[in-house]
Amino acid sequence: MTARTATRPAGSPVLDVDALIDDPATRTIVCCGSGGVGKTTTAAALGLRAAERGRSVVVLTIDPARRLAQSLGLGALDNTPARVPGTRGDGDLFAMMLDMKRTFDEVVEAHADPERAATILANPFYQSMSSSFAGTQEYMAMEKLGQLRAAADRDGTWDLIVVDTPPARSALDFLDAPARLGSFLDGRFIRVLAAPAKVGGRAYLRVVSMGVGAVGSVLTRILGAGFLADLQTFVAALDTTFGGFRARAEQTYALLQAPGTAFLVVAAPEPDALREAAYFTERLHDDQMPLAGLVVSRLLDTPAPQLGAEEATAAAARVSAAGTSPLTARLLTLHADRMRAIAAQERVLARYTAAFPQVPLARARAQAGDVHDLEGLRAVGASLAG
Amino acid sequence: MARPTSGGPSFADVDLHVVSGKGGTGKTTVAAALALALAAGGRTTLLMEVEGRQGIAQLFDSAPLPYEERRVAVAPDGGDVYALAVDTEAALMEYLETFYHLGRAGRALRAVGAVDFATTVAPGLRDVLLTGKAYEAVGSRRGGRRRYDAVVLDAPPTGRVTRFLNVNAEVAGLAKVGPIRTQADSIMGLLRSSRTAVHLVTLLEEMPTQETGDAAAELAAAGLRVGAVVVNRVTTPVLRTRELAAAARGDLPREQVCETLALAGLADVGVLADALAVEAAQAATRASLQRRERLAVAALGHPVLELPELPAPPDLGGLYELADALRRQGVT
């Protein structure tokens, strides 16, 4: 019923979505982009399409809309992949929603003896860091990805993991989070904070260097002794428990760079979203992350590309003047508006493609209604595959 | 200045307007329009940005904003809109200097990575600084009076805004005494008072309105006041209600449309008429979804403001248009 609009930007290669998801070498697909661009829908649609084409897929989502979550059988946060009922074909689709606190707790429990784990879990700093401070989501999404990938490699459970990244406040957060946390936990600051817990009492003021002593006393002045003691316990516990946190972060980072991982930048055809997409594209390139392409969501199209906006407007004016059929005049105006909106989307998209002509594009058409069932996801997937 | 007369929400007693919304709803644009509307009639407002995206500079078509308050626009009847893009690291150093006169020790903190820790690894601390900056702007005085008649904060998106605003309660839970505790208490005092209103920007689409409802409930539970729900990018359907209904049923008068198209000199009218009918049916689906979402927004029980869809991309002229629309709905 709908024809593709003719104004495809010249030069950009087409992203062959089916080739990407069919290739057994593709083990992980990471969907990134700013918030509100259809990232979760894209991840779910790709996962469903891959499963229905025979792969065994797990989709890791961060915060799906309620009805989309329900359609994937994600009634509650349970932090483990559950099979999605109702898929067609031989493949399997699993989905899970990230519970960041639970993921963090599990990391602690897996790496500390029960007594130490209990101390950490009860620490007020741990509790606020694991449940309420933003940024933890990024770390935990990467942690969970690492876990799923390890399980997939070990048990052969899934051969494709599709990840929907958190709506990072900036492009940087999501890529930098693991390295930052790693460098922080291995850094001097942590040693300063951890010092009193290790040497005991206030001895650290004498033991450590001048600059560090100043820092310690400043922190005590600012934060109060109780605050510092809690923080120190937390840090010391983390420090010993997560001895290899940096190694872990580096592993995750390496996993992202490894063959088998494909990044998709998702953007709506709007100036802000594409500006963020450009930023992501540069960042992925700088970090040598394998960018498979740009997914442009919500592209408008028309079944009547032959009638241009100006021609339609002029015809509407003639019909109005004749006064015979106000309905037809309005239908022509509606079409003219649609053609203008399509042209505006293409202009915005052309700015991106001019800057990154080598990045393959996949285009997903806007759906008339909201997408919240497998049928809707199938339509998005079919549209993506062209 | 001529006061608008419609019975919209009055925010005359509000000093801090926090604007949030799901990603992609246009919250930065709405925040800017609100700052412009509130500055009308010779007042002065400050528009603050905290996410380091330089969205304000792009809207007002200026160079990236430095970390200082800068006038970015003049409101109708001679008000001033200042803007500030808060740089977290600079804010931290400034905070430490103001409260603790740190100097060298502040630099030592930077050297051991404490600044990096505060601004990146523990984003909760970043939120403490950013809300503190808003608190400071609200209280800032010049020449014996408040420097800004209103401060508009372009806040993090709905998914994070309650945590963001509530971070000081979190801090208060960690720091039982001391200057940090005192500061956290003062900031929470302002944020939870009637001097602060949190406005939620949404679109007439399912996910944004759902998130708006969730955010409104979370804010209320945290003791924060929801000001208005701002429905952005509202379009008026081109077709009449009855025509939309007919289009949805696939019941448009095809003969009449074909004849009229032919008279208007268009070719291949059968194909064209069918295509136009498809577009009309899609418009009907959209209109009915919008009706449903409009009811959902109204059911939230907060004042609702509507802003029209503007030709993309948003520019300065568009901002004045939106500001005017806000004023006509009673925002002063």
Image (cartoon, coloured by chain):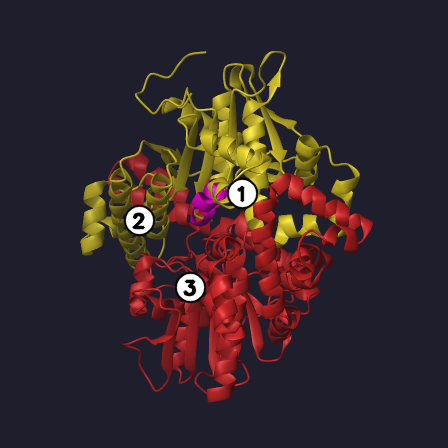
* Residue A348 drawn above or below residue A23: above
> Which chain does the numbered disc 2 sit on?
B
Residue designated by label 3 = A99
Cα distance in 3D space between marks 2 and 3:
57 Å
Dot 2, crowdedness within 10 Å: few (<14), some or many (≥20)?
Answer: many
Cα distance in 3D space between marks 1 and 2:
73 Å
Cα distance in 3D space between marks 3 and 1:
27 Å
Residue designated by label 2 = B261
Type of residue at label 1? Ala
The foreground one among A345 and B260 is A345
The colour with which the image depicts chain A is: red
Secondary element at tag 1: loop
> Which chain does the numbered disc 3 sit on?
A
The C terminus of chain B, quarter of image: top left
In the image, taking residue A50 as reference, residue B122 lies left or right, namely right
Q: Which chain is yellow?
A: B
Residue designated by label 1 = B175
Contact between marks 1 and 2 (CB within 8 A): the answer is no
* Residue A260 drawn above or below residue B173: below
Contact between marks 2 and 3 (CB within 8 A): the answer is no
Name the residue: 53% across, 17% down: B43
Q: Where is residue A365? Give x, y as percent.
A: 41, 61
Q: Where is residue A371? Give x, y as percent.
A: 33, 61
Secondary element at tag 2: helix
